[in-house]
Amino acid sequence: MKNRGKSDMRLALVLLFPSVFLVLLLVAYPMISNIKISFFDLPINPRLDATFVGLKNYTDILTDVEFIKSLGITVLYMILAVAGSTALGLAVAIFFNRPFKFRKAARSLIILSYVTPSISLVFAWKYMFNNGYGVINHLGVDVFHLFDKAPLWFDNPVSSFILVVLFAIWRYFPYAFISFLAILQTVDSSLYEAAEIDGASTWEKFKNVTIPAIMPVLITIITLRSIWLFYMFTDVYLLTNKVNIIGIYLYETAFAFNDLGKAASISVILFIILSIVIIASRKRVKFNGNG
Amino acid sequence: MKLKIMSVALIFVLSVVLSACSGSNKTGTDEIITIEFMHSSVEQERLAVINKLVDKFEKENPAIIIKQVPVQEDAYNTKIITLASAGKLPAVLEVGQDYAKVMDKEQLIDKEAVTETLEKAGEKDFYDGALKLMTPEDGKGYTGIPISGWVQGIWFNKDMLASKGFEEPKNWEDVLKVAKAFTDSGSKKYGIGLPTIEGGFSEQAFSQFALSNNANVLDVNGKLDMNKKAMKDALTYYKELAQYTMPGSNDTTEVKDAFMNGTTPMALYSTYILPSVHAEGDADNIGFAIPEQKTKAVYGTVSAITISSGLEDAQKEAAEKFTAFLSEPENMTDWVLMSPGGAQPVNKAVTENAAYQANEVVKSFGDLSTEIATSFNDIQVFGLVGGKNYTKMGDITSSGAISKLVNEITVGGKSVDGELEIAEKKIKDVLSK
């Protein structure tokens, strides 16, 4: 029996080897390489010598007011967009979790914003909010007379921020919608019937039946969407240059200022921040018995 | 035993996979050399022209295979940095004059090979303005072989201007008068389509006014020399002129749309407006003006073909051959005619080429085509001062400090003095690195 156990272990290791090898190659190697770069002043040309600068890149970044500002804007953007897209996705999923005419067609239409390439959506939004001929300004100024003059939507930092958050909520809520709809369809309807017999209100049914049932999916959506939005670049970069989120700060450091060492140190700092937040939130979820 | 066989099989499979991923420059026989050619012509019709050129070259040089790497213009510089950092920079690249400076600073260009090829191609046939833009800071050799270019100025609708008794605007004051006369913001009509976006377009547009007022970013010694009266006057003028353009940040789309749909009678734009004007059948009604203040300054840019540094001898030789092939007048003409009217010749042999002159779009603009081509010699750009083309200007442009300055004073309504100081500080930070 002992020999058999040993041989199984060897076989298991051999079978695991390709996966482990790929993880090391595709995840561990770039990570270690990135950490190494973060301690250097690295020229673009690999034939030129890199200069070891120790922790200078890290101290420069952590003392840069622009970095702190970018981080703050990113966190706010992430919280609002995650909360908004998750809440909207859940609300629409609950609404769609019942039979009605053209349900399938309506579901397909809802996921359009998620499956359409960012660039097309961004251009559509930019045209909609164009200062000269945008439909929003036409409605606001000429039809409903809400404003005397068309607001400069993407030129004002506050309105730009609100718009990029709204864009993210609208663009990403279908992901939450699909996930919630899938799990809502597995909830036993007898639980709602029992709650009804007990005299539970709609809110109480939602709180005591729906939320516990969808909790695993809810946690997954919030975690994944937070990570994705924390590193967001394309949507915001294409929509406006008045919202300097961390993805744009990182891009500019690497590709506008060609400072690869500093860019590497930013990604290490972000990785640490995000890891701490995720580990802490997972622990809290487990502590509360929901994980 | 089974375990050994499995291990060997696994190693074999991995070796095959990894060797397949690694790629090879050689395709079976040692004599055949494959080199990569990176360019920004991703559109189908442009790719068709380049494919034809590549086929022609490969027929003439059967031992060389050209592997194309077409990259979107927006992602071009990012791709160069990524490939260069990985030591995988293509042997031959299309590059703009600004980024050529950044590449030169990083020693990514084989200037010796480029210069030799350009000399063989016939240096004297190229317009001086185009060559000036590709000259490195020390004035020795070239960073790329100009293949096409575009110039920028004020395009005006002759009929619209005539309707209010105006002729071609000659100087700052004329431009302002016309812009003022046509602006009626209540009816969404504006006097000029002016770039105000926080991006390269605004820096390019503003540079034309600043340089015509003898204000450059650097002085003859390459020192930062921005915060001076001539620059402040140019900024103040640009801010005033921006009152007569569409509200908000105007980029290429907004400026071109406004001019083409008749919202504005003037627009500051490159020659890339001409194909649309031709398509609208309005070629006779368009004029081109270079507003002059103290001097004449045309903003223009050159697209060049360059050879990357650090190549093996055989690859370098192949790269030189391909670059020389693209520099032949006939092939350069094909390249320029990928976008007739938009892309302009940078070589007299192309301007005089029968195929170029017979092109329908070029012909439709008549004398204007010649006027534009000769304006290459009046090109002035930030960082080119006293015959020296300072490399550090590439970093200044990449930092976005000047475009932010233009955007803040025009759209943000901020003060010229305050924003000039902010830009100056940002540029100093960039230059100190």
Image: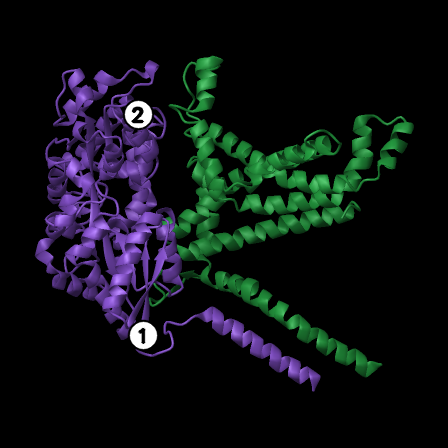
Chain colours: A green, B purple
| Residue B58 located left or right of residue B363 | right
**Where residue A179 sits: x, y (%)?**
69, 42
Q: In this figure, which residue is indicated by the disc labeled 1? A: B32
**Where residue B256 sits: x, y (%)?**
30, 31
Can residue A75 be spotted in the picture? yes
Q: Earlier in the sequence, mark 1 or mark 2?
A: 1
Q: What residue is shown at x 74% (from left), y 34% (from top)?
A: A97
Instruction: Indicate whether A55 appears above or below B226.
Output: below
Can residue B386 be spotted in the picture? no
| Residue B262 located left or right of residue A169 | left
**Which sits in the foreground, A275 or B178?**
B178
> In the figure, residue B252 lies in which quadrant?
top left
Instruction: Indicate whether B299 appears above or below B8.
Output: above
- The Cα–Cα distance between marks 1 and 2, rounded to whole angstroms, is 53 Å
Instruction: Indicate whether B208 appears above or below A2.
Output: above
Q: What residue is shown at x 49% (from left), y 61% (from top)?
A: A34
**Which sits in the foreground, B268 or A265?**
B268
